[in-house]
Image (cartoon, rainbow, N blue to C red):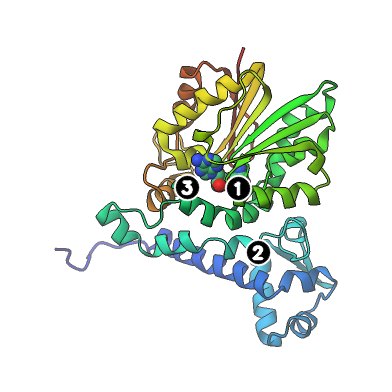
Amino acid sequence: MHGLSTKSLNPPGVIHNLMRAQWAGAIIANSTQLKIFDAVDLGFRSADEVARETGIQPRAAEILLNALVSLELLTKDEKGYSTTEESHYYMVSTSPLFVGGYFQARPAFARAWQNMAEIVTTGKPGAEINKDETAQEFFPDLAAALFPMNFAYGQRLAEYLKIAERTEKVRVLDLACGSAVWSIPLARANKNVHVDALDFAPVLDVARKFTEKAGVKEQYSYLSGNWQDIALSESTYDVVILGHILHSEGKVRSVELLSHVYGALKKGGTVAIAEFLVDSSRTSPAFAAMFALNMYLVTTDGCVFSHDELGDMLNDSGFVHVREMPKNQHDSDVMLADKV
Ligand SMILES: C[S@@+](CC[C@H](N)C(=O)[O-])C[C@H]1O[C@@H](n2cnc3c(N)ncnc32)[C@H](O)[C@@H]1O
C-alpha cells in the first residue's frame, strides 16, 4: 500500500499530456462536423464571420479558432484566420480528400476501445472484422474513410516505382483494395497501367465510385470475394499492392498470402506492403504499438509486425531486395520486395 509520498515529486506530465490529446481529437471531429474549416477556407477570416457562417456563438468561435491555431490546423495573423495546406486539402468538406468520414466510420472500433477492459480480461474480441460477414458490413464505410488518409502515400508509391516512365503495359493487383486508393495514383500516372482490384463485393462498389471519380475506371477490372477463395493467375502481375491487410490476417495467414502473391507476380515484379510496423522492441512508434492493441480488440488473430519480422516473412516466401519507401517522421510504412 502506498503512503502519500514525502519525496519531492514532478507533476504527472506524461499523463496530463495524454489526457489533453483526447481533447484535440474532439476538437477536430466537431470542427469538421460544424464546417469550421469550410468557412475559414471560403475567406471568412474573423471569428465573427465564422460564427455567422457556421451558426455557432461568436465567443465560442474565437476560442475554437484559437485552439485550432494551437493545433497547427489554422494560422492567425493581422488579417485573421486562414487554413493551412493540410487543413485546406483534408478538413474542408467539399474537398475530395476530406477526412470527416473517418470520424463517423469507426463505431465498431469506438465500441471496442470503450470495452477494452472487458475484452482484454475475457480475451474475446469486441468485433471480428477478419470474418467475412462482419468485414462486408464494416469495411465499405471504413474503406471510403481511408481514401484521404492513404492517397498521398499512393502518389508516393507511383513516384517511387517510376510508374509514369513505363512504356509497356503494367499489370497491377490491388489486393484488399478498399477504395482502390493505393492503385488509383498508379493508374492516373500512366494509361498503360491496368489494375485488378480485389475485395469483398460491397467494398468493390466503393472502389468503383472512387475509380470513376478519379477518371480511371476504364483501367480497372474487379475480383470479388475473400482472397483465400480466389485463384490468382500465375506469373501475371508487375506490381501487387497489399494496403493495410496483413495486420488483420495475423501472422499465419499473412505468410500464406505472401506466397499466394509470390506466385501471382511475374519475375521482376514487386510487392508493396503498407503497414504500421513496430521496432524490434515492439514498443515504438507509439501509434504502431497502440495499433497492435486495436487489432487485438477487433480481430481474433490480428497483429502488427516488426520491420525485421516482415522482412524475414518476405525472404522466407522467396522475395529478395527487401526495402522500405523513404518516409517522414509521422508516416506509416511501405515495405517492398521483388520476385527474381
Ligand atoms: C484496412 S482496409 C484497407 C483498404 C485499402 N487497401 C487502404 O489501404 O485504404 C482493409 C481492406 O481489406 C479488405 N479485406 C479484409 N479481409 C479480406 C479478405 N479476406 N479478402 C479480401 N479482402 C479483404 C477489407 O474489405 C478492406 O477493404
Q: Residue at x 73, y 60 (%)?
A: 87
Q: Which mark is residue 201?
A: 1
Q: Residue at x 47, y 40 (%)?
A: 247
Q: Which mark is residue 100?
A: 2
Q: Does residue 322 appear to the left or right of 13 in the view shown? A: right
Q: Secondary structure at mark 3?
A: helix
**Amino acid residing under circle 2:** Gly
Q: Which of the two labelled residues, at mark 2 and mark 1, occupies the earlier sequence position?
A: 2
Q: Secondary structure at mark 2?
A: loop
Mark 3 highlights which residue?
Answer: 132
- Give the distance between the C-alpha atoms of the residues marked 2 and 3, in whole angstroms: 26 Å
Q: Secondary structure at mark 1?
A: helix
Q: Position of residue 209 (x, y in %)?
A: 74, 52
User: Within 10 angstroms of label 2, few (less than 14), some, or many (20 or more) residues?
Assistant: many
Q: Does residue 191 appear to the left or right of 224 in the view shown? A: right
Q: Work out whether 185 lies above or below 287.
A: above
Residue 330 shows in the view? no
